[in-house]
Amino acid sequence: MISAPTRHRYRGRLKAVIFDWAGTLVDFGSLAPMGVFVEVFSRFGLEISVAEARAFMGLAKREHIAALLNLPRVADEFRSAYRRAPGEADIDAIYQVFVPANVAAIPRHCDAVPGAAETIASLRARGLGIGSTTGYTREIMAVLAPLAAKQGVRVDAMVCAGDVPWGRPTPAMMYKCFLDLGVWPAAACVKVDDTPAGIGEGVAAGAWTVGVCVSGNAFGRSLAETTSMSPAEFAESRAAAAASLAGAGAHIVIDTVADLLPALARVEARLATGAAPDDGPCGD
């Protein structure tokens, strides 16, 4: 007789941290894709807002374009312009314009988030693997990764949109990253991301998740804009961004990657008790 499966309880140390890129390690505010989405859709006679573009951040870029075309307002605008519903060929046409435009925007939005290089160096000194998954394609990361490396932001394994058959929020990219890093179980790993789709990816993989709210997509402001906000405006925007990440299943929500080390200490404290990621948030 085969007994019912039991949940694996991992009491060891953390083995790896798997990061997102834009809004997490680089590009404070996740600004690079936003202007590109607005510009590229405009080339096809379609007007979208930055808020609409941000709603699907974290998805692979082709899926992101498909989701935007599926918005009722945008779909109606497409029908008015083209006298038909948008289809796969239209997604492909926009995607073919989007990728080179996003590549061109990267050098303007590649600054490391303050504290990113120092945090990665600390994790590496502890012997942790440094991985990444991203909604960016290989073409985009071929430009971004060297620019980030010059600032001390380097990873040991990188999985991009298109490297596996399924993107976020499925766990496929996380699984490949585990294999590339040579780490297991998933409960020995932490996913750090600024989008609900990226947090969902980590949850689906069975990893611990840390949401990054102030430098990320939901907050959506540059570093300069963030530092000039009034305390009340900052608190309101932070609460909304944090709620979106917590709602996606983040175990802990932090402001930026500079705050990651104390968050990892909280995860390790939970591990020491035999807690598993699906036991829920780490609390304050």
Image (cartoon, rainbow, N blue to C red):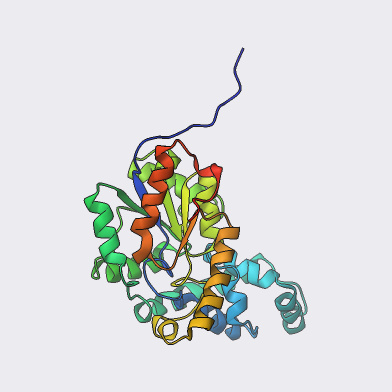
Q: Residue at x 46, y 44 (%)?
A: 175
Give the mark count. 0
Q: Quadrant of residue 142?
A: bottom left
Query: Does the rendering let one see residue 168?
Result: no
Q: Position of 1 compared to 184: left or right?
A: right
- Where residue 81 appears, as percent x and y from the top left, is 73, 84
- Where residue 137 appears, as percent x and y from the top left, is 44, 63
| Residue that protrudes farthest toward the front in the picture | 284
Q: Quadrant of residue 259?
A: bottom left
Query: Does the rendering let one see residue 76?
Result: yes
Q: Position of 247 compared to 266: left or right?
A: right
Which quadrant: the N terminus? Answer: top right
- Where residue 281 appears, as percent x and y from the top left, is 53, 51
Q: Residue at x 44, y 53 (%)?
A: 191
Q: Position of 146 compared to 27: left or right?
A: left
- Where residue 21 appears, as percent x and y from the top left, is 40, 65
Q: Residue at x 44, y 82 (%)?
A: 226
